[in-house]
């Protein structure tokens, strides 16, 4: 996937940081009159260069910078994904030679140029996570993640979770002083209805799942059936107006046939795709799912930033809750 120079997609989340022990205090985003905070927990790992996760393919996702911006009331995290084994970027030029006798249009000429990296360089991209105050409820903050391939909320939560788990702080239970630590949860903000999405998108596939029945596989307990999956291609247009009736009818028949999990694949005009899981009782009600907001920038953005980029943070802070 190529990154655009003047555009990014952002996705909203609710991030909760809560103490493991119920009697311990919730950590603030930034320092107050106490010395303990979420920022401090993350900064310690950054300083130690241990705020990272190594992926199965050898890529490294690392938290590079943590800054609290009082004017925005936001804690900003900058992540890098470095790929030591990535192929060097290649650039193409396509042109035509001058016309000649018998070749009025001229011959097509294509050249490519490879950008060679140095021995100690790694192809990299970066992403910002902006966590905003005030808390929407105790310990839970609205956050905006810059969508960059390979830097998902899943790996970010692992990096944050490890830092917070190793960051212990004291609390009192009765007269006894104890220590606790915090854990982190992240949930995508569901802000898009299926009907609204179908004004700009279309359903390509419906995927059904049920427990598999395979009596032929039960040989001395060596093989165990798990799930059976059926993928249905949608050949007609499903619109915002007929979605509920069409999908409800399909899912009712599917449930009667023993299927119990249903996913809908949607493609949008901006060439992005989203898979939405439908719950059993959800097909007749409004279906909400996590959407991405596309934001344009006046100045070009680098694929990988060394420091936190002001214009990215400003745009992320300006995104309204729920879209």
Image (spheres, helix red, strand yellow):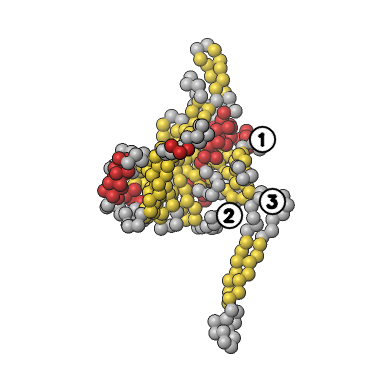
Separation (CA) of disc 1 from disc 3: 21 Å
Mark 3 neighbour density, 10 Å: few (under 14) some (14–19) many (20 or more): few
Separation (CA) of disc 2 from disc 3: 16 Å
Q: Which residue is drawn at 53% across and 55% down?
A: 1
Residue 316, x across and y down, in percent: 47, 47
Q: Do the residues labelled 1 and 3 touch (CB within 8 Å)?
A: no
Q: Which of 99 and 246 is in front in this view?
A: 246
Residue 43 visible (yes or no): yes
Q: Is mark 3 on a helix, strand or loop?
A: loop
Residue 45, x across and y down, in percent: 62, 34
Separation (CA) of disc 2 from disc 1: 26 Å
Q: Of the residues under marks 2 and 1, which one precedes in the sequence?
A: 1
Residue 6, x across and y down, in percent: 51, 57
Q: Of the residues under marks 1 and 3, which one precedes in the sequence?
A: 1
Q: Residue at x 60, y 42 (%)?
A: 55
Residue assigned mark 3 = 121
Q: In this view, does 215 lie to the left or right of 285?
A: right
Residue assigned mark 2 = 302
Q: What element carries label 1?
A: helix
- Residue 14: give its label: none
Residue assigned mark 1 = 48
Mark 1 neighbour density, 10 Å: few (under 14) some (14–19) many (20 or more): few
Q: Residue at x 41, y 34 (%)?
A: 136
Q: Of the residues under marks 2 and 3, which one precedes in the sequence?
A: 3
Residue 290 visible (yes or no): no
Q: Is residue 195 left or right of residue 119?
A: left
Which of the 4 image quarters holds residue 14? top left
Q: Residue at x 45, y 33 (%)?
A: 140
């Amino acid at each position: 996937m190529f990154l655009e120079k003047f555009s990014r997609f952002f996705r909203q989340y609710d991030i909760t940081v809560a103490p493991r022990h119920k009697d311990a205090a919730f950590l603030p985003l930034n320092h107050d009159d106490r010395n303990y905070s979420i920022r401090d927990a993350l900064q310690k790992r950054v300083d130690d260069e241990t705020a990272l996760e190594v992926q199965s393919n050898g890529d490294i996702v690392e938290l590079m910078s943590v800054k609290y911006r009082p004017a925005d009331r936001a804690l900003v995290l900058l992540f890098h994904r470095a790929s030591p084994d990535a192929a060097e970027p290649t650039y193409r030029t396509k042109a035509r030679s001058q016309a000649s006798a018998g070749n009025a249009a001229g011959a097509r000429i294509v050249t490519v140029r490879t950008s060679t990296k140095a021995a100690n360089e790694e192809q990299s991209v970066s992403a910002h996570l902006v966590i905003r105050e005030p808390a929407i409820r105790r310990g839970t903050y609205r956050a905006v993640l810059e969508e960059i391939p390979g830097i998902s909320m899943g790996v970010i939560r692992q990096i944050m979770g490890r830092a917070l788990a190793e960051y212990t702080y004291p609390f009192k239970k009765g007269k006894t002083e104890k220590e606790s630590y915090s854990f982190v949860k992240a949930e995508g903000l569901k802000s898009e209805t299926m009907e609204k999405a179908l004004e700009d998108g279309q359903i390509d596939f419906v995927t059904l799942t049920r427990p598999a029945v395979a009596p032929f596989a039960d040989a001395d307990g060596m093989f165990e059936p798990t799930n059976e999956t059926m993928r249905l291609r949608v050949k007609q247009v499903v619109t915002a107006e007929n979605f509920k009736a069409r999908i409800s009818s399909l899912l009712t028949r599917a449930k009667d046939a023993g299927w119990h999990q249903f996913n809908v694949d949607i493609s949008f005009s901006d060439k992005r795709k989203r898979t939405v899981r439908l719950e059993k009782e959800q097909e007749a009600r409004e279906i909400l799912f996590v959407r991405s907001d596309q934001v344009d920038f006046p100045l070009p953005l680098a694929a990988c930033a060394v420091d936190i980029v002001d214009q990215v943070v400003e745009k992320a802070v300006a995104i309204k809750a729920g879209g």
